[in-house]
Amino acid sequence: MPRGRRGSRVSALEGGREEEAPLEAAAAPSALWASLPQPEAAADRTLLRGIFEIGRGSCDVVLSERALRWRPIQPESPAGDPKYDFLCKEELVELKDIFSVKLKRRCSAKQQRNGTLLGITLFICLKKEQNKLKDSTLDLINLSEDHCDIWFRQFKKVLAGFSNRPKSLKVLLNPQSHKKEATQVYYGKVEPLLKIAGIKTDVTITEYEGHVLSLLKECQLQGFDGVVSVGGDGSASEVAHALLLRAQKNAGMETDSILAPVPAQLPLGVIPAGSTNILAHSLHGISHVVTATLHIILGHIQPVDVCTFSTSGKLLRFGFSAMFGFGGRTLALAEKHRWMSPNQRRDFAIIKALAKLKPEDCEISFLPSISSQDLREGKVRGSPRSDCSGQWQMTQGQFLNVSIMAIPCLCSVAPRGLAPNTRLNNGSMALIIVQNTSRPEFIKHLKRYANVKNQFNFPFVETYTVEEVKVYPKNCNSGHNPEEDGPHENCSFPWNVDGDLMEVTSDIHVRLHPRLINLYGGGMEEMTDSKVTCNCL
């Protein structure tokens, strides 16, 4: 795709104001769209037709209600020439993949605006392998001011018709995430794309733990179409928790005890800038900053199930996943060594927790999901616990780890997910119970998460599909060790909730609430199951 003559500066301009594309954005040769599936021609009304130079040749270009198509203009050739047929093959880009349009002008070094018109630049989202998205450009070259103005106005009208795309966003940036890279990630990769898309932003850099909660409790959000979290899993979970608390308050509900919470009023965007980025990875199928940003720009909405964590009838927080036992202990140890780098802190905590591996003595009650295969086949272990529905089940004993997850929890160390059979919004949670076993067997189980083998194919691992879970620790012997973790007035048990440490002194009740919050994302399942054909570089 031509980028302008040597010695001159070419930029995409709108209204005479220069708009520079991010360094990542590169013009994509037109042939790269050749393999795209053709949208149905029926009811696809033609809006405009004209001639533009695309790549290095003139093309017959047709703008319809669904797609932009073009075909090279070639001299007549003998029928049946395969080379000629290939060169004349129609190519296209779907309008839903275009997120901005600018007038393309050549500006000299002294010119600040209104240089020589070259044509139109379209900013496009390309779908690549493994759910990855990439921003690119497509240049439509034509030197006619009138011709380009007509097409430019029509493209703007088309883009304005995508009402689900955000126009203004509240951005919450955690500068302490991971290696303190969140600021660089946002201003280097995210903000340039948001500016190209014409999205207004209001950025707040969080300064202390709990800042997000206090900020979203009071600030005005009426002018925003969504909220974006730039940070790790803890940051995103905190923003989700704050948005849901605000929704309950606006609905006039008591936030101390919530049985049927109302959904969050604004969608949440998650820019991965943490160490594990489980939420972003589960949402997009990949932990990739540009992919997450383009999902936000294009207004892709994915409803996601959320859990409430409560004790003694009092709400503690909203969240997506939790671990008790080994997972909670590991995080508690890591939090006490914040001076280490994230990777060193994680490795140290895992090794120390394994060296002092011990089970939790507790009782676990759970309500199997109505759609649970275990319930239908009568495979649930344990004896029923008293309940008016008669469906509660109970198991007790010594457990090394208990995981309760409403999302798949994908990450780099568990590419299939910590709970691979769970989906983002299937109305159920995965309950994974690891019974007491030897240290070598437990380590073998942990290693299975990193490969394609079934990590649950052990006699000491039980899995259930549930709607509610209650965990009752039996005694304090398995709680914090004062010699290792410091003195505690009350015996407390560490829980890992979305990467945040939550210390609880009594039982925990986890309840699932389907589709309680909308997240910006295409959804890993949606992009995979629908077998979307990618226009790849």
Image (cartoon, rainbow, N blue to C red):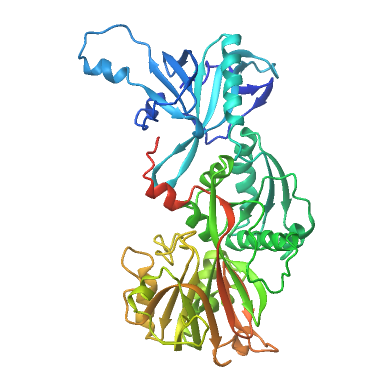
100 displayed left or right of 425? right
Q: Is residue 400 above or below residue 406?
A: below
Instruction: Tell me residue 187's x, y (percent).
Output: 64, 43
User: To which quarter of the image does residue 381 belong?
Assistant: bottom left
Q: Is residue 421 left or right of residue 335?
A: left
Q: Residue at 68%, 87% (x, y): give it.
A: 488
Residue at screen point 45% across, 25% down = 44
Residue 358, how many percent across, how many down? 47, 87
Q: Nearer the viewer, residue 49 or 146?
A: 49
Q: Quadrant of the N terminus?
A: top left
Residue 262, picture quadrant:
bottom right
Q: Is residue 261 above or below residue 502?
A: above
Asked whether residue 337 is in view, the answer is: no
Residue at x 54%, y 77% (from the top left corner): 328
In the rendered image, is residue 416 in sight? yes
- In the image, farthest residue toward the left: 80
Front-most of 411 and 10?
411
Q: Most extreme residue toward the front, as rendered?
A: 388
Counting every numbered tag in the picture gives: 0
- Of 362 and 530, nearer the camera is 530
Residue 383, given in percent of the width and then of the height, sits at: 42, 88
Name which quarter of the figure residue 99 lies in: top right
